Amino acid sequence: MEIVKAELIGFCMGVRRAVELAYKVIEDYKGSKIYTLGPIIHNPSVVEELRGKGVNVLDSDFSVLDSDSVVIIRAHGVAPDELAQIEASGATVIDATCPRVLRSKQIVEANVASGKSVVLVGDKDHGEVKAVSGHSDKVVVLDPHLDYSVALDVKVPVVLVAQTTIKHDEFYKVYEFLKQEYSDVEIVDTICPSTEKRQEALLDLIGKVDAVVVIGGKNSANTRRLAMTVEDSGLPVFYIETEDELSSDILNYNRVGIAAGASTPDNVIDSVVCRLVDIGGCYE
Ligand code: SF4
């Protein structure tokens, strides 16, 4: 069995930056109660490693915070109402919001301020979408997987923006629909190139292998999309979080591709490759 890695794999810029910042906070704020607002990234092994170093995950219960607390905002950003509650507690806020998410937020804010209707294409429950849209009830969130052809009622001019991790074809499908319905629709492409490049690298990989192992958190949207892309291609996909989940069925394939989401650490990818080599894989 030959092992072939995708050309682009593992942490994206925003995730790497957030994780590095978390480790810096551990050094800089010894003795403080350190939290990340939600899991720092969608990867259980990283979250557990940080927990072992005293960094806990803060859920919606902000009553645990006080002036000895430090709260790290993850790459997805934070909804304004949550930020206000954290700041009111006296906690120190360390902002690891990805610059690309900040850009989306600024675009949304500027267009809302100029009186335009903003439609944000994405998952309304995703942290980034809440962070980007949360400052205004004038932002309409449209899930590209639901039937958006009903009950959309916005005034022109309309500005269309995207969650950074959705697929281009999903985004442009919504654009085509809105253009039929509204006379003045402007599209601002806020999809992160990292996500797109990862998809392109995966498509390239799919053409070279018989099956693909996709490594990443089951709660990671961009990893799930990678797995869906493999499924759509018709190739078998082994979607795993760690090497322990690897099924022996993988031995049925001659060329096995490795892909990983933007929140998958290098050491987890390396462990999967090592396990494949242990069971007879060949990797150069
Ligand atoms: S996928 Fe893109 S937008 Fe999201 S954290 Fe990574 S670099 Fe930032």
Image: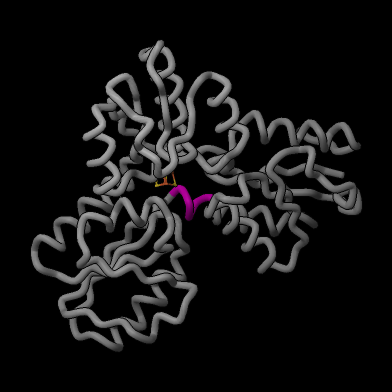
- Residue positioned 32% across, 65% down in the render: 120
Report the coloring of the rendering. one colour
Q: Quadrant of residue 8?
A: top right
Q: How many marks?
A: 0
169 and 110: which is toward the camera = 110
Q: Is residue 39 above or below residue 132?
A: above
Q: Is residue 130 left or right of residue 157?
A: right
In percent of width and height, residue 89 lies at 26, 31
- Residue positioned 10% across, 60% down in the render: 113
In percent of width and height, residue 243 lies at 76, 38
In percent of width and height, residue 265 lies at 59, 33
Which residue is the extreme one toward the front? 63
Quarter of the image with the N terminus in it: top right
* Residue 137 covered by magenta stretch: no
Q: Quadrant of residue 260?
A: top right
- Residue positioned 37% across, 67% down in the render: 121
Q: Is residue 107 left or right of residue 129?
A: left
Q: Quadrant of residue 138?
A: bottom left
For ligand 1, give the image quadrant: top left
Q: Is residue 155 above or below residue 17?
A: below
Assign the magenta stretch its main secondary structure. Answer: helix
Q: Is residue 214 left or right of residue 244?
A: left
- Residue positioned 48% across, 25% down in the render: 55
Chain part drawn in magenta: 194-198
In percent of width and height, residue 280 lies at 90, 37
Q: Is residue 126 above or below residue 244?
A: below
Quarter of the image with the C terminus in it: top right
